[in-house]
Amino acid sequence: MRNIIYTLLIGIILLPACVEEDHLDSVSSGNGFGDFSFRLVPEEYEGLPAESLQKGHRPQQAFATTERQTLSNYDRVEFVVVDDDGYKVNGVKGLYDKNTSDMQLEGLHEGSYRILILGIRGDLTDDNATINPINHISEVWLSFPEELARPLACEYFYSITPFTVRKVSTALGNEVVAEIAEKIVQRRIVGRMDLIFSYNNPYVETAVTSNTVAFNASSRFYTRLSGEGTFSGESNGEMKVLDMAEYTEYLFMPTIEGSSVQGEVTLFTRDYRGNMTKRYYTFDLDSVVENHIGRVEINVVHPDDEIGTMFITNRAYTQGQHGLILQDDEPHTIYTDKELRNFNTTRPLQLSVTSEGQLHARFYSPRSLSHVLVKARIPAAGNEYVDFAYFDSIPPFADFYEAIPLLQKELYFRSESGKIVRIPRMQADDFSGIEFKIESDDPYLEKLKGIIHGWNIRFHLYDGDPTKPDGGPVGNWMGIRPVHCREAVAFFLNFTYMIDMPEHEEILRANEDRLYGNGGVNDKVTPDVVLRQMRQERTLNVGLVYPGNGVIGLGGGSSYGVWQTGWLSHYTNTYACEIMFHELGHVMGYNHSSAFTYGPWAQELMNHFYVNHLDDMPINSSSYLNSSKNPNLY
């Protein structure tokens, strides 16, 4: 669309003459013909709620714009200049500049005139609208089909403004002076109807699967506008069913006299158990008035209004703008704080209730978990587990906080035995001692449940500095970054899953004669001892090893780390895995004389088992994290 639009006396107008004139300016031209300019300014909607103006309300549809603006930004402008008797004046040229909203006219002689202007936002072909040529102000200028199958796509602004052109004598000779408003304020000839839904349960709102509106045939709208702003014509009442997933604000021509806008909303919702509910809500708006907003408020009374289960659909989760942990922009003071970032691999999904009464779900996982039912036993409310929350999906590294509805009022829950139980309104302290358990049909949960013996994982800088380009190495350590922390989560979920795999136990027993301790090859270690050592709960401070000194792995006691390549390639690289397990051998208490460092346990059995059985493990692909392409690597 070009910013400059030229028009030659083609008419379009809207609603009756409604013009505010700041004052009359005398604009002179020395060419003997009127040549002057003015600015087109749209008037605000009437009926726009005050809070919307204060918050900079922006309606959902593309055609609607922020109110209290000074620029018209029309996509098309039509105008007609008429004389005192209402007949079109020929030979007038006009120019509209979309960037400034200024309009220029030229070609007028002395006389009294009125200028009819129609500004359009949008493409009028979307409305099948027709701009008709007119010779007199009483003729139909703008028209729509009688079959208005849907609301209008465009906004139409109209004004009719009187002005005069006269000659005056000056020292330079005769000049033409036009007396016209500096700003011409235009009003919409269309009105807006807003459907506003009031939900008694926010989880019903975010569980809507379909929301449609059908208008009654008795709803009739004008279809024509004359040059002088008179409405006529009538729609035939036929209107398509509209999907309100796209818009809940609609533009119409004004309703004909005596007609209201009636219709029915059909709402489909689902609940966390997969049941569908269909509800109907009727409405009646007295009329659609040009340049006005008519608000239709629908109180959504629903069978699930008193259900207390927190139904976190994907939509609800997105709207909640919940955080994530271990992200690239997380400060090192956070991710290395042992109180803020730590987990046990048997409990990667951490559930709790905060002191403010919020449900907190934190997920140490590179993969999402779907269809998660959280059951809770609240000692203050009874001894039976109830369906406390349900997540369509918990994203990787989720950090979810949301107020528990029971803080507001008493609610009903489904108990584990299938009964519907009432739990009275509670205070945050009443959740003390709450216990959780989760259920899901997602196969990933079965993998996580396969982690029976957990290790505690935290992250440590070892005096390195992750804010420096080289990691601020100190000795053989450098500053670990979130990209490495996430890979550590993946590796230790896999490792602690592996230690309870039957195939893992089998390979240890099949190679019992190759397992030896710190005393060398004759210091035999039984598979049962090895399994016990691997399955022993341990706490590791995980870091990043600086390879500049020729060291690529460090381990022992509670310290553990490998170089960057190890964290990136443990999925498929047996050498990287050899280093990973070599350092785990040190953590288990073995030295370099044992099979667990420079021997078959680390160099052959474990590294190959890990790579060859990756498909069976919880984090079975590097694509979940895609760390090798992360811009925050060293």
Image (cartoon, rainbow, N blue to C red):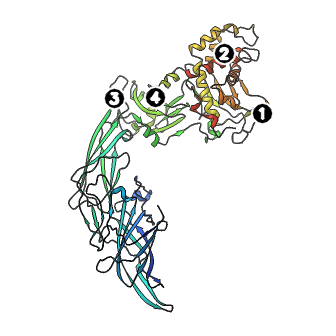
Q: Secondary structure at mark 3?
A: strand
Q: Amino acid at mark 1?
A: Gly
Q: Earlier in the sequence, mark 1 or mark 4?
A: 4
Q: Amino acid at mark 4?
A: Ile
Q: Quadrant of residue 228?
A: bottom left
> Closer to the camera: disc 1 or disc 3?
1
Residue 337 visible in image = no
Residue 148 visible in image = yes
Query: Residue 548, which numbered label?
Result: 1
Query: Residue 434, which numbered label?
Result: 4
Q: Position of residue 62 (x, y in %)?
A: 41, 54
**Mark 3: few, some, or many residues within 10 Å (few <14, many ≥20)?**
some
Q: Which residue does the image show at 62% across and 31% down from the upper left?
A: 487
Q: Position of residue 144 (x, y in %)?
A: 29, 60
Q: Which residue does the image show at 42% across and 32% down from the upper left?
A: 389
Q: Position of residue 278 (x, y in %)?
A: 29, 37
Identify the residue position indicated by label 3 in the image.
421
Q: Amino acid at mark 2?
A: Leu
Q: Secondary structure at mark 1?
A: helix
